[in-house]
């Protein structure tokens, strides 16, 4: 990075944070601090919802996913538009009608205070533990590639987001989201344009897409019913619907983005904006990854993209032999691709078929060598990081983009890290203040200024916890997966509480509260005794919570279920 | 205290005030149709290139 890159990076990232803090420095109203501006339109809400979901990992990992496994991952988002329609039609009108600050207040009004505390507690546990990861995960990649000290990246990112989130609360979060999304969009468009311009002469988008397709990277949809396939239309629609409903309907970091605003109409249109744009947006990011794959068929590239990790271990002749073998395989693959492109235009079907077979075989050989490289790393050090797909896009950025654009793309990574982190901190601070602090100090609720002060302190406290956690996260192995597992263990029961609240109106507080605790215990026991994919615990937790609620409502004595249907 | 419920919040029957749409149901149908169209386009894309 040179001076131009630094100017762009600091100008955008620090500039947006400073602008957000300055514009919202006079926020004194609790409503504005927790729910954002009362005049926010659908565009602001829609961009804020989008920026919250788009973390730095989205822009680092998803192109890598397209590079490594193709664009089939787009199917994971198929349930999202359907979930947003349900949130618009059912969840949002209820939240607005009850005028709540948090989703868990709704549980209190629908059931009772115990259930509200349970829901808020599950959210804090899950989000609080994940808080450090949203800083740590991108920081480890950025610091590795750029050679910056990891702790410095974590502290810089953490402090920046704490300053503007604490200062202006939800209003600052929404305001900065708009500009952060502008930076992200400009950066991703720049990367795509540069990538297309850097493709070999005569190849163009169409030629590159045909190469990517022939090498198995462009299967966007798969209607297979084979349960062993990870991404199909069916897992996307059903699994994606379930996950998106949990995330958009019950996670305060998203709920807080759309319950404010000028009116119900603005919130709904903001969500519909996401329902329409999300799949095309993810498709383009994945396509970028697939085109990167084609680009690297013609450009020199390392056998392992996490070069810092590779250099740390690749000391002996075995590694040098793998590097040499890889260079030869890439050259052969390149010749095979060119031969196939030529054969495609020859109108000779037999020649085209044999050229395609040779190209696929050459591609397979390159993939085998990459696998050998990873195995060699693991053999040299069992703790070595053997996944490098997250490093593919950032390697392209640093080696192929012109100066200035490099700064812009690094700013994309920081902007996305800050945008998701800010929503998370605001949600954690709000839930702690509204669902816990005010619950235990009901007399303080009338003092608005004190409420804002307390919300600021809790937001800052969660920020410090997140930074501290991120600083020590390096000691834990497979940290990100552990956090995902923990999220799956708690997310299902939380969604179950809301599904019962909305759709099972005869079920009362005592039944659902007991059911949720039982379902949570069941999920935890199952996790320690079964060996199934952790994503299934989302479904199991939700289904168990619903089933137990209905059953308990039927068997509990009349006094215990006397409060049925309070706010439903 | 949490603010009182909003008695003045527009009802479900309130028009969305979006050109071409008279009801929210119409907007939801449009979004669903858009989703179906996107899946079809992705299937066509797969058919052409994969």
Image (tube, helix red, strand yellow):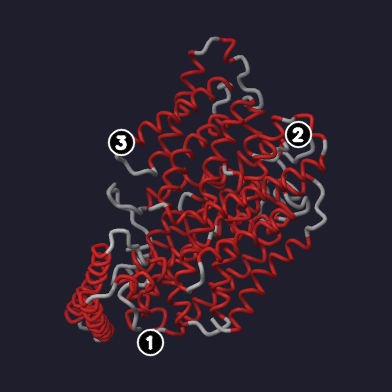
Identify which residue is drawn at 81% across, 47% down.
Answer: A29
**Residue A253 in the image, given as x and y percentages of width and height:** 60, 48
Kindly indicate the quadrant of the structure image that contains residue A405. bottom right
Asked if A9 appears above or below A121 in the picture, the reply is below
Quarter in which the C terminus of chain A is drawn: top right
* For marks 1 and 3 on the same chain, the one whose residue lies earlier in the sequence: 1
Residue marked by disc 1: A200
Quarter in which the N terminus of chain A is drawn: bottom right
Identify which residue is drawn at 48% across, 28% down.
Answer: A546
Q: Is residue A505 visible?
A: yes
Q: Is residue A344 visible?
A: no
Q: Chain of mark 3?
A: A
Q: Residue A92 bears which disc, if any?
A: none
Marks 2 and 3, Cα distance to the nearest angstrom? 45 Å
Marks 1 and 3, Cα distance to the nearest angstrom? 51 Å
Q: Chain of mark 2?
A: B
**Residue A497 in the image, given as x and y percentages of width and height:** 54, 32
Determine whether the residue tagged by mark 1 lies in a helix, strand or loop.
loop
Within-10-Å neighbours for mark 3: few <14, some 14–19, many 20+? few
């Amino acid at each position: 990075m040179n001076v131009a890159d630094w100017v762009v990076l600091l100008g955008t990232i620090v500039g947006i944070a400073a602008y957000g803090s300055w514009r919202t420095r006079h926020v004194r109203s609790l409503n504005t601090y927790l729910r954002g501006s009362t005049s926010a339109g659908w565009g602001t809400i829609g961009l804020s919802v989008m920026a919250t979901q788009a973390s730095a990992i989205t822009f680092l990992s998803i192109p890598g996913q397209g590079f490594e496994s193709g664009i089939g991952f787009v199917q994971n988002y198929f349930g999202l538009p359907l979930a947003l329609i349900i949130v618009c039609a059912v969840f949002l009108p209820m939240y607005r009608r009850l005028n709540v600050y948090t989703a868990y207040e709704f549980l209190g009004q629908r059931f009772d205070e115990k259930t509200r505390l349970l829901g808020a507690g599950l959210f804090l546990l899950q989000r609080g533990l994940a808080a450090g990861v949203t800083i740590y995960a991108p920081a480890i990649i950025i610091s590795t590639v750029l050679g910056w000290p990891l702790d410095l990246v974590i502290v810089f990112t953490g402090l920046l987001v704490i300053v503007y989130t604490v200062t202006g609360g939800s209003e600052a979060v929404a305001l900065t989201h708009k500009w952060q999304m502008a930076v992200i969009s400009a950066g991703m468009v720049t990367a795509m344009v540069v990538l297309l311009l850097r493709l070999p002469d005569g190849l163009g988008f169409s030629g590159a897409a045909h190469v990517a397709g022939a090498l198995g990277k462009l299967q966007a949809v798969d209607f297979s019913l084979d349960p062993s396939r990870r991404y199909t239309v069916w897992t996307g629609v059903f699994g994606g619907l379930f996950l998106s409903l949990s995330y958009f309907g019950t996670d305060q970091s998203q709920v807080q983005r759309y319950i404010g605003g000028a009116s119900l109409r603005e919130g709904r249109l903001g969500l519909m904006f996401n329902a329409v744009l999300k799949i095309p947006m993810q498709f383009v990011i994945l396509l970028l990854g697939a085109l990167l794959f084609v680009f690297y068929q013609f450009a020199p590239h390392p056998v392992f993209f996490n070069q810092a990790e590779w250099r740390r271990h690749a000391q002996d002749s075995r590694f040098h032999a793998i590097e040499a073998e890889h260079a030869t395989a890439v050259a052969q693959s390149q010749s095979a691709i060119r031969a196939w492109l030529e054969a495609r235009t020859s109108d000779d079907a037999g020649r085209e078929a044999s050229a395609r077979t040779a190209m696929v075989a050459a591609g397979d050989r390159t993939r085998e060598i990459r696998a050998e490289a990873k195995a060699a790393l693991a053999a040299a050090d069992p703790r070595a990081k053997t996944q490098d797909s997250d490093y593919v896009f950032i390697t392209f950025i640093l080696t192929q983009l012109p100066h200035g654009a490099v700064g812009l793309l690094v700013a994309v990574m920081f902007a996305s890290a800050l945008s998701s982190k800010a929503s998370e901190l605001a949600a954690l601070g709000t839930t702690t203040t509204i669902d816990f602090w005010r619950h235990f100090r009901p007399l303080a609720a009338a003092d608005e200024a004190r409420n804002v002060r307390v919300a600021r302190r809790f937001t800052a406290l969660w920020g410090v916890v997140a930074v501290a956690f991120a600083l020590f996260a390096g000691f834990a192995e497979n940290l990100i997966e552990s956090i995902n597992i923990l999220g799956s263990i708690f997310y299902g029961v939380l969604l179950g509480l809301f599904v019962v609240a909305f759709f099972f109106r005869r079920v009362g507080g005592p039944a659902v509260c007991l059911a949720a605790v039982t379902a949570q215990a069941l999920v935890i026991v199952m996790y320690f005794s079964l060996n199934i994919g952790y994503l299934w615990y989302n479904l199991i937790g939700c289904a168990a919570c619903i089933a137990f609620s209905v059953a308990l409502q039927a068997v509990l004595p009349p006094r215990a279920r006397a409060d049925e249907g309070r706010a439903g | 205290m949490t603010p009182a419920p909003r008695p003045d919040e527009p009802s479900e029957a309130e028009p969305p005030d979006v050109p071409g749409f008279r009801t929210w149901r119409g907007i939801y149908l449009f979004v669903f149709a858009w989703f179906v169209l996107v899946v079809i386009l992705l299937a066509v894309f797969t058919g052409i290139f994969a």
